[in-house]
Image (cartoon, coloured by chain):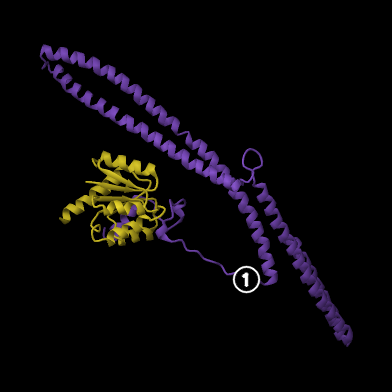
């Protein structure tokens, strides 16, 4: 299981990386916005995407849409971890096909719960 | 300010009221040429009053602009360093300092956590192993050789526990001290805030005077309404409670998503 963490703040990437490690996911890669994340995703080795919304260059919602529009990438589960908490934005993310939405500041429990839920659903769909 | 600006208009109003009475008096006695003269006087007074008022407004607008420029000049930091640097540039530097300081503190704290976690894990696994054998000792289930072994292991463990506790203690202290960034960045942000409030006050004054010039001259401006795009993001919401469009917690987000079939 290889996870790509996309956030423009290195401290937030580090926090997410450490929490994921605690959950047993040790294989992670990082990118600082959608523009740098896309080529990594297109490399074809990423199984799970955790992304922020508000980033310079390509934002998280644009990245999500780009992933869903790409034949090869569209089935990658996407978890959004962001400070964006407007009703319309969450609806937009849901419509764009997000698999989970965690608002910052978040707890380790919330992150764990959402990730587990996503994998449960994926397993159930198999 | 409005009192000074409006005084010419009040004078003119009184003049019109008095003139009207005079006009009626002249008309009642059939003195038409006298009446026409009064009308002419009133018309002249109207022109004068209008020009006076515009003049007055122009002057105060000019003053407001000048004040703003002087205050902006005042924003230039004189002593110590770059003369061309304004307080705004300085404020922006200060905010960058906040970003750097908070980032350094966060990283230092995470470094300490990273170096503490393995120590705690090792302490835990050694204690668990010892406790298992200690239990057997209580049950009188140990051979003399195992007992001698346990005897030595406990000595090693106690010295390791002492060492680990010292390391953890020092790491926790470092984490505690790192929180000093809150004080430093708080001071910087307070100063930048004061500057913003100051500049805003001056701008509001300028806008108020300009608005009066508009109302006298009859100029109208089109309000430009810039709607912020959701795609770019808004950053963290500050006044969540007052904004019905913003959700307050993960629970609310979960409720919304589940209402959408998630």
Q: Residue at x 44, y 32 (%)?
A: B178
User: Could you tell me which residue is drawn at 42 percent across and 30 percent down?
Assistant: B176
* Chain identifier for the yellow-coloured part of the image: A
Work out which quarter of the rendered image holds the C terminus of chain B and state it.
Answer: bottom left
Query: For mark 1, what is the residue?
Result: B220
Q: Is residue A45 visible?
A: yes
| Quadrant in which the N terminus of chain B is drawn | bottom right
Rendered position, B184 above or below B42: above
What percent of the width, then of the height, locates residue B212? 68, 65
The vertical placement of A80 against A26, above or below, is: below
Of residues B126 and B110, the one nearer the viewer is B110
Q: Chain B in the picture: what colour?
A: purple
The chain to which mark 1 is attached is B
Q: Nearer the viewer, residue B175 or A5?
A: A5
Residue B1 seen from this side: no
- Where does residue B233 sit, x and y in percent of width and height? 41, 56
Query: Which quarter of the picture shows residue B22?
Result: bottom right
Q: Is residue A124 above or below residue B45?
A: above
């Amino acid at each position: 299981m290889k996870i790509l963490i996309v956030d423009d703040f290195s401290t937030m990437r580090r926090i997410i990386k450490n929490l994921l490690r605690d959950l047993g996911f040790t294989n992670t890669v990082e990118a600082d916005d959608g523009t740098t994340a896309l080529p990594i995703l297109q490399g074809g080795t990423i199984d799970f995407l955790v992304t922020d919304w508000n980033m310079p260059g390509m934002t998280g919602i644009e990245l999500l849409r780009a992933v869903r529009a790409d034949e090869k990438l569209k089935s990658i589960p996407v978890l959004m971890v962001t400070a964006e908490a407007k009703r319309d934005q969450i609806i937009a993310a849901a419509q764009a096909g997000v698999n989970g939405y965690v608002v910052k500041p978040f707890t380790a429990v919330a992150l764990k719960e959402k990730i587990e839920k996503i994998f449960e659903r994926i397993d159930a769909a198999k | 300010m409005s009192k000074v600006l409006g005084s010419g208009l009040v004078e003119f109003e009184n003049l019109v009221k008095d003139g009207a009475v005079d006009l009626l008096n002249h008309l009642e006695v059939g003195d038409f040429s006298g009446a026409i003269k009064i009308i002419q006087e009133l018309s002249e007074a109207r022109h004068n009053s209008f020009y006076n008022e515009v003049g007055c407004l122009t002057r105060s607008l000019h003053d407001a602009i000048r004040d703003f420029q002087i205050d902006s000049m005042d924003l230039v930091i004189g002593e110590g360093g770059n003369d061309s640097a304004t307080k705004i540039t300085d404020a922006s530097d200060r905010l960058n300092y906040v970003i750097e300081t908070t980032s350094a503190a966060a990283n230092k704290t995470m470094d300490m956590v990273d170096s503490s976690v393995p120590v705690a894990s090792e302490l835990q696994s050694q204690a668990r192993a010892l406790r298992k054998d200690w239990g057997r000792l209580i049950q009188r289930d140990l051979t003399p050789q195992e007992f001698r072994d346990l005897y030595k292991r406990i000595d090693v463990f106690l010295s390791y526990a002492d060492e680990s506790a010292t390391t953890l203690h020092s790491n926790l202290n470092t984490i505690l001290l790192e929180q000093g960034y809150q004080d430093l960045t708080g001071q910087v942000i307070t100063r930048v805030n004061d500057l913003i409030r100051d500049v805003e006050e001056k701008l509001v004054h300028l806008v108020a005077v300009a608005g009066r010039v508009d109302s006298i001259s009859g100029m109208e401006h089109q309000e430009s309404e810039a709607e912020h795009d959701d795609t770019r993001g808004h950053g963290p919401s500050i006044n969540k409670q007052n904004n019905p469009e913003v959700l307050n917690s993960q629970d609310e987000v979960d409720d919304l998503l589940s209402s959408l079939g998630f």
